Image: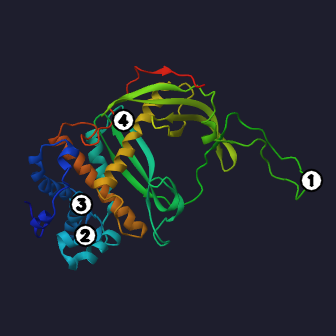
């Protein structure tokens, strides 16, 4: 092993890789033995982003820990297993406040990975992912909707940028969401008239203009039995074709209580009955197939969240600070990029991983209308 910045490379072998990593990456089990050296070579490309060899080795230890067979993939168990009990605070310092350039690491890694997977049919996706948290001292924590729990709860919410094409998929960036009211789930089907509401005889007279009709909740709009839903085949999954019902409507967004721009509201009802929706600023004449394709490609960022939380320690951080959260996520994304490279080099170069069996690229041949009674 190259030990230019590894004071003792064999320390990285104190923990093994995730036991299912060969299946997840669709590689031969014997290739797993090559991964530690591959990781060292990969991190060496970012050496100038760190101040010294100690920081580089801390990054190596953390990255190996994220993709390891450890049950808990936070700072303390990684440090104890690889670096020793006396190095816990040193690894904490590296993640939270040590002077290394996380932005430079992420920017360079994005360029590298996009060089390999960018394609004309690629799509960038922005989505949030939450981690439940106790207490009030972690940056960005408040009672807000937590996707993990399906309800409003005390949590942190990250906003993530993902990318998917038929050459691969990965996360590219992450920002910690600092809570504010920035999104409305109400719309108008027609642009409302604006005026000063009529005086109701009690209290002060209205003086400010506002919409004279109330917007509709999207969840209520989705219950309208007259909506022209149609069933589409989204592609082949691990258990056969994946069908969903979809519909689109031109609506007026509600922004801060006032009518915003006209846009598409795209509704998708999955086989389990759950309805997901998205707004799109696509042109009025965009084919329905394009919106369906975009909807189906959102699956990949959800899969990345599952992979990140399932076996890459994405939600195992034990930091409270804003910089600490971003550094942890930077290293999670970096190990994702590394493993994507391993999959492309040693594996079958599939867009999806064999363990989870996601759908294949979208197919529209089964698109047909359905009526709701």
For the residue pair 200 and 105, the one nearer the viewer reads as 200
State the image coordinates of residue 305 (x, y, percent, origin top left). Answer: 37, 50
Along the polypeptide, which appears first: circle 1 or circle 4?
Answer: 4
How far, Cα to Cα, is label 4 from label 2? 38 Å
Along the polypeptide, which appears first: circle 3 or circle 1?
Answer: 3
Secondary structure under tag 1 reads: loop
Q: Are marks 4 and 3 in contact (CB under 8 Å)?
A: no
Along the polypeptide, which appears first: circle 3 or circle 2?
Answer: 3
Along the polypeptide, which appears first: circle 4 or circle 3?
Answer: 3
Residue depth check, mark 4 versus mark 3: number of the one nearer the observer: 3
How far, Cα to Cα, is label 3 from label 1? 67 Å
Local crowd size for mark 4, using a 10 Å CA cut-off: few (<14), some (14–19), many (≥20): some
Is residue 202 left or right of 17 when viewed as pictured? right
Along the polypeptide, which appears first: circle 1 or circle 2?
Answer: 2
Q: Which residue is mark 3?
A: 63
Local crowd size for mark 2, using a 10 Å CA cut-off: few (<14), some (14–19), many (≥20): some
Q: Which residue is mark 4?
A: 122
Local crowd size for mark 1, using a 10 Å CA cut-off: few (<14), some (14–19), many (≥20): few
Secondary structure under tag 3 reads: helix
State the image coordinates of residue 62 (x, y, percent, origin top left). Answer: 24, 64
Q: Which residue is mark 1?
A: 201
- 89 relative to 304, above or below: below
Secondary structure under tag 2 reads: helix
Is residue 194 left or right of 362 when viewed as pictured? right
How far, Cα to Cα, is label 3 from label 2? 13 Å
Secondary structure under tag 4 reads: loop
- Residue 361 appears in the rendering: no
Q: Residue at x 26, y 75 (%)?
A: 88
For the residue pair 269 and 317, the one nearer the viewer reads as 269
């Amino acid at each position: 092993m190259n030990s230019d910045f590894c004071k003792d490379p064999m320390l990285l072998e104190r923990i093994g890789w995730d036991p299912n990593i060969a299946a997840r990456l669709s590689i031969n089990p014997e290739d797993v033995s090559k991964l530690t050296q591959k990781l060292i070579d990969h991190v060496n490309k970012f050496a100038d982003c760190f101040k010294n060899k100690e920081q580089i080795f801390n990054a190596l230890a953390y990255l190996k820990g994220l993709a390891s067979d450890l049950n808990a993939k936070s700072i303390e168990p990684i440090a104890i297993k690889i670096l020793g009990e006396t190095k816990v605070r040193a690894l904490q310092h590296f993640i939270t406040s040590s002077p290394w350039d996380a932005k430079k690491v992420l920017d360079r890694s994005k360029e590298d990975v996009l060089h390999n997977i960018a394609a004309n049919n690629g799509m960038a996706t922005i989505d949030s992912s939450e981690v439940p948290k106790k207490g009030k001292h972690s940056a960005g924590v408040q009672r807000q909707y937590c996707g993990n729990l399906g309800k409003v709860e005390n949590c942190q919410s990250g906003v993530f940028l993902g990318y998917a094409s038929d050459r691969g998929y990965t996360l590219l960036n992450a920002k910690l969401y600092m809570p504010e009211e920035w999104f409305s789930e109400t719309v108008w089907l027609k642009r409302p008239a604006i005026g000063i509401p009529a005086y109701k005889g009690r209290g002060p007279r209205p003086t400010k203009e506002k919409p004279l009709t109330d917007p509709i909740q999207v969840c209520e709009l989705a219950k309208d039995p007259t909506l022209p839903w149609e069933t589409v085949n989204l592609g082949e999954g691990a258990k056969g074709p994946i069908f969903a019902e979809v519909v689109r409507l031109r609506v007026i967004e509600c922004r801060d209580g006032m009518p915003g721009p006209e846009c598409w509201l795209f509704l998708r009802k999955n086989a389990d009955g759950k309805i997901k929706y998205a707004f799109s600023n696509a042109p009025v004449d965009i084919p329905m197939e394009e919106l369906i394709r975009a909807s189906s490609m959102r699956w990949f960022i959800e899969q990345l969240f599952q992979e990140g939380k399932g076996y890459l320690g994405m939600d195992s951080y034990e930091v409270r600070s804003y910089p600490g959260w971003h550094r942890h996520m930077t290293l999670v994304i970096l190990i994702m990029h590394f493993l994507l490279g391993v999959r492309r080099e040693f594996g079958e170069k599939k867009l999806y991983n064999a363990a989870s069996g996601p759908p294949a690229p979208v197919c529209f041949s089964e698109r047909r209308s359905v009526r709701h009674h």
